[in-house]
Image: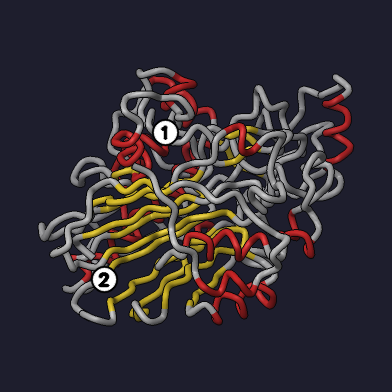
Amino acid sequence: MSTFLEPHPNINSLPPQQTVKVREWFPLSPKSNDDASPTLKLMTWNMLAQTLVRRELFPNSDCLKANQRGGLLPREVLTYNPDIACLQEVDRLEKHLPIFHAAGYSHTYACGPQKPHGCMIMWKSEKFEKLAEHTVFYDEVDLISILNDSLSDDDEKPQRKATTRVTKNIGLILALARKDDASKGCIVATTHAFWHPMFTYERARQIGILLNTVRQMQASDERYRTWPAYLAGDFNTQPIEASYSLLTAQPLTPAHVKSLDHSRVIHISIDTTVPPTPNAANVKEDEGGAAAAPASTATTEETKTSATDAEQKNDAKKGNEKETDPDRIITNSRRAVASDDLLSDEELLRLFGCEQQKGLRSGYDEALRLVSSGSKDGLFGGRVGDAAVGIWEPMYTSYTFWWKLTLVDYIFILDPPEPVGKPEIVGVLKPHTKEDMEPGLPRAGVCGSDHTSLMLEFKNGW
């Protein structure tokens, strides 16, 4: 039976005219009167940085200006009152932080070099104390020590980044101890992985680095070995992609192998001798793509960039879309060769720990399986059938005029290395329906971002 959560009392301080669509909450187990164990509500949400908003990208949105979205963004968080919130595309900190601090949250923020937006993890100060933090700059990570375990400390270790391009993407990882029992807590990681649909390898590399780094933190302290880890963020990957299968320890399919191989390239940002692709759009590729694909063919994240993108989008709307649309093909790049030393499929499996470790649990795939009563209406499986993995994931977590994305946002659960009990999902926030989001986000009265928030409630093991 569904219900509605009690919002944070500070929600009354926000502009009353800036409202959001309040979604139902599904408890997954009845609460016993003698069960006093605390629970944890964890949210993830891509807030849509104001610096990335363009009318050309959201032509039918009714709330794009900063003063129109200013109350919608904190209201989304305070409506569901999470204990921990993992946020991406965060900017305008001078506006948001006073509201969140007044509501009792502490925060850690990080961003890539010269990026005007970043990732932020917030937690309720009365419940948690931060013990450790680590920012992962994916462009700079040296994989040699991770993959060449046979090397001794005395061996000369060459650097091996195995990256295809400069992206400025990051991951942020915190260790949070409970204030009522410092021996207990959790590790929380968030990320905003590289967006480009065709760069499957680079996205898998980044997500694998994040997971490996989380596992390293779990192993770095005796306490952490009994703590679960939550990887929550905008992974820019769909359940049909290689990264999802690698995270959940599912076998790579021939289609995955083909996609990974096709995207093993070297971009001009790594090798400046690469000749630019003729007629390729002049876009800031690290921030998003060029022309947004029509809704029926959009396959992955964010086409939020500079005003130069509008010209190409207008061409596409007129039926003049060029074959050099960089959302559809890889531009300004060359094929990788052996000396580029990119990761093989076998090395990606090692990076994700697929040979020795259990896969991660996808919280929404697990939770919605329980509440859907077998129906896949509104779920990923309703679009792809029962053969795919992740069929119980939400159908959409991003829904706009130009792109309707099957799923890019997730809450993954990494059970603790020591067998002390795994987190149990006891509540799930219902996804928005397609009808809620028509004709496209951001939308006043619904959601102030182009992404929807996800939230789960856990008990045990934290």
Residue beneath disc 2: 185
Real-space CA distance between mark 1 and mark 2, rounded to the nearest whole angstrom: 31 Å
Check the picture and name the quadrant holding the C terminus.
bottom left
294 up-or-down from 210: above or below: above
Quick check: 438 above or below 205?
Answer: above
Q: Is mark 1 on a helix, strand or loop?
A: helix
Does residue 125 appear left or right of residue 32 in this picture? right
Residue shown at the point (40%, 56%) measured from the top left:
210
Question: In the rendered image, which quarter contains the N terminus?
Answer: top left
Residue position marked by numbered label 1 in the rendering: 242
Amino acid tagged 2: Gly
Question: Does label 1 or label 2 sit earlier along the sequence?
Answer: 2
Nearest the eye: 442 or 209: 442
Above or below, 347 relative to 391: below
In the rendered image, residue 381, in percent from the top left (x then y), is placed at: 42, 24
Depth check: 365 or 447 in front? 447
Question: Residue at 53% across / 61% down in the picture?
Answer: 79
Q: Residues within 10 Å of mark 1 (few under 14, many from 20)?
A: many
List x then y, in percent, for residue 183. Answer: 18, 77
